[in-house]
């Protein structure tokens, strides 16, 4: 990596984070689980002392104690803001900064991946403003804040792996990312393969380094579970699913796969007559390929799998990160688009770029016109939806 790439990455991250922060001015959230948890951390507690009725996913974890079910990374990122802002504001601002900053990290990772600067810039732009990451980060409610926090560190793990850096660092970064979104941990073996390929080392050595880097974070989360539930297992999620009609086959089941395939490929927006804003986001979600049309090029990248181990490792990372989501009881609603895709977003962006620009190991110098149009359409869809939902409450 050249200094100019690092400088460009920093500026892209700063500008995108500033745009995200500006897009959310005046907006907070009622679902400030993480902001409240950050305030609790500042006071030496891992539990909350009250459970408002609208925070219905807080669970009792002791006498007068209520615990946040989700992993704690977004609360940790909110800590610097918690002393100065209300809990809801601290949470959403941290979400926006993390989501926007991930664009710069992803640019750096894409350059390490081998993309020309034009493609890397296109990928950073697509990720920041042409996917559901934009709305999710700006909105910043608890479920969305987890995605933006995870995305930042998963993009970092991808960047280190793509340049053949320290496998231990890759494992640690995946572990940190998993402290926001547990499914991303499954991408670790594929990132170890990418790291080994780039570094010219053996896979076993790389995988061992990734495991060594991830184990301390896994132990940290086990300890957090012991504090909350008195067991190393993630008992909170199991309690949430009890009696829930969406989890009639447990938290995960192959029987849920069909509902996810429908959400990914077929879920349409709502058409509302009698208004110029007739196209409205549906809270259940919207097809990934309607939300981000540029992701159609992912399928073209698959032609390179047999001849390019780097593309194969990236595709495997995307698949592994999404596997738990595909067997999860819900498809991620309330949401715009299919938010679980953010768990694999660095890899999906890299694959989409490869689908347009990589052929037999050679990259084009710049994106094709049709791919540029797909990116522009992706930006239009996501910017429109973000404005429509956050400013006009167009969420049917």
Image (cartoon, grey):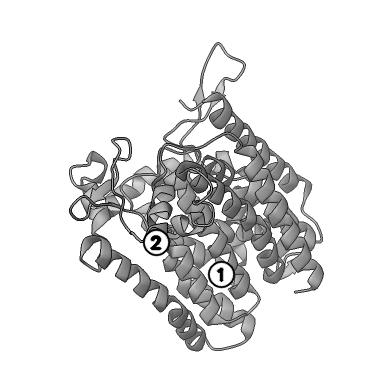
Please tell me how crowded label 2 is: few (under 14), some (14-19), or many (20+) other residues with Cα within 10 Å: some
Residue 86's place in the image compared with 281, above or below, is: below
Q: Nearer the viewer, residue 349 or 81?
A: 81
Q: Nearer the viewer, residue 79 or 217?
A: 79
Taking the image as shown, residue 116 lies to the left or right of residue 233, namely right
Tell me if label 2 and label 1 are in contact, CB under 8 Å. no
Sequence order check: which comes first, mark 2 or mark 1?
Answer: 1
**Residue at x-position 34% and y-position 50%:** 257
- Residue 374, numbered label: none
Circle 1 is placed at which residue position? 157
| Disc 1 secondary structure class | helix
**Residue at x-position 58% and y-position 52%:** 99
Position in image of residue 208 (x %, y %):
45, 85
Q: Nearer the viewer, residue 24 or 338?
A: 24
**Residue at x-position 47% and y-position 82%:** 207
Q: How far is the residue under mark 2 from the one under mark 1?
A: 15 Å
Q: Can residue 391 be seen in this snapshot? A: yes
Position in image of residue 124 (x %, y %):
68, 54
Instruction: Tell me the quadrant of the picture where the C terminus can be found.
Output: top left
| Disc 2 secondary structure class | helix
- Residue 182, numbered label: 2
Q: Nearer the viewer, residue 388 or 205?
A: 388
Q: Can residue 305 be seen in this snapshot? A: no
Taking the image as shown, residue 80 lies to the left or right of residue 228, namely right
């Amino acid at each position: 990596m050249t200094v100019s790439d690092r400088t460009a990455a920093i500026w892209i991250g700063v500008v995108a984070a500033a745009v995200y922060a500006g897009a959310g001015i005046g907006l907070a959230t009622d679902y400030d689980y993480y902001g409240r948890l950050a305030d609790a951390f500042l006071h030496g507690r891992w539990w909350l002392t009250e459970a408002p009725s609208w925070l219905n996913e807080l669970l009792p974890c002791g006498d007068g104690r209520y615990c946040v079910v989700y992993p704690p990374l977004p609360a940790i990122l909110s800590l610097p803001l918690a002393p100065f802002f209300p809990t809801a504001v601290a949470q959403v601002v941290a979400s926006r900064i993390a989501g926007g900053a991930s664009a710069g990290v992803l640019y750096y990772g894409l350059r390490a991946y081998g993309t020309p600067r034009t493609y890397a810039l296109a990928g950073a732009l697509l990720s920041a403003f042409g996917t559901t990451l934009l709305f999710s980060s700006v909105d910043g409610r608890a479920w969305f804040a987890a995605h933006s926090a995870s995305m930042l560190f998963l993009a970092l793990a991808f960047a280190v792996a793509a340049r053949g850096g320290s496998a231990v660092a890759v494992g640690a970064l995946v572990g940190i990312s998993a402290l926001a979104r547990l499914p991303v941990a499954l991408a670790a073996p594929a990132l170890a393969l990418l790291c080994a390929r780039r570094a010219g080392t053996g896979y076993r050595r790389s995988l061992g380094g990734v495991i060594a880097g991830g184990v301390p974070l896994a132990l940290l989360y086990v300890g957090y579970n012991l504090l909350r539930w008195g067991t190393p297992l993630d008992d909170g999620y199991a309690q949430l699913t009890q009696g829930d009609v969406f989890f009639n086959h447990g938290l995960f089941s192959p029987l849920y796969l069909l509902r996810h395939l429908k959400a990914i490929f077929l879920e349409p927006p709502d058409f509302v007559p009698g208004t110029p804003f007739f196209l409205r986001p549906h809270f259940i979600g919207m097809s990934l390929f309607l939300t981000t049309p540029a992701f159609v090029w992912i399928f073209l990248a698959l032609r390179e799998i047999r001849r390019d181990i780097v593309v194969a490792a990236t595709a495997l990372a995307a698949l592994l990160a999404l596997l738990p989501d595909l067997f999860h009881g819900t498809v991620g609603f309330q949401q715009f688009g299919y938010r679980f895709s953010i768990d694999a977003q660095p890899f999906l962006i890299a694959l989409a770029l490869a689908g347009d620009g990589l052929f037999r190991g050679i990259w084009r110098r710049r994106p094709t016109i049709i791919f540029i149009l797909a990116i522009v359409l992706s930006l239009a869809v996501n910017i429109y939806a973000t404005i429509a939902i956050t400013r006009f409450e167009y969420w049917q």
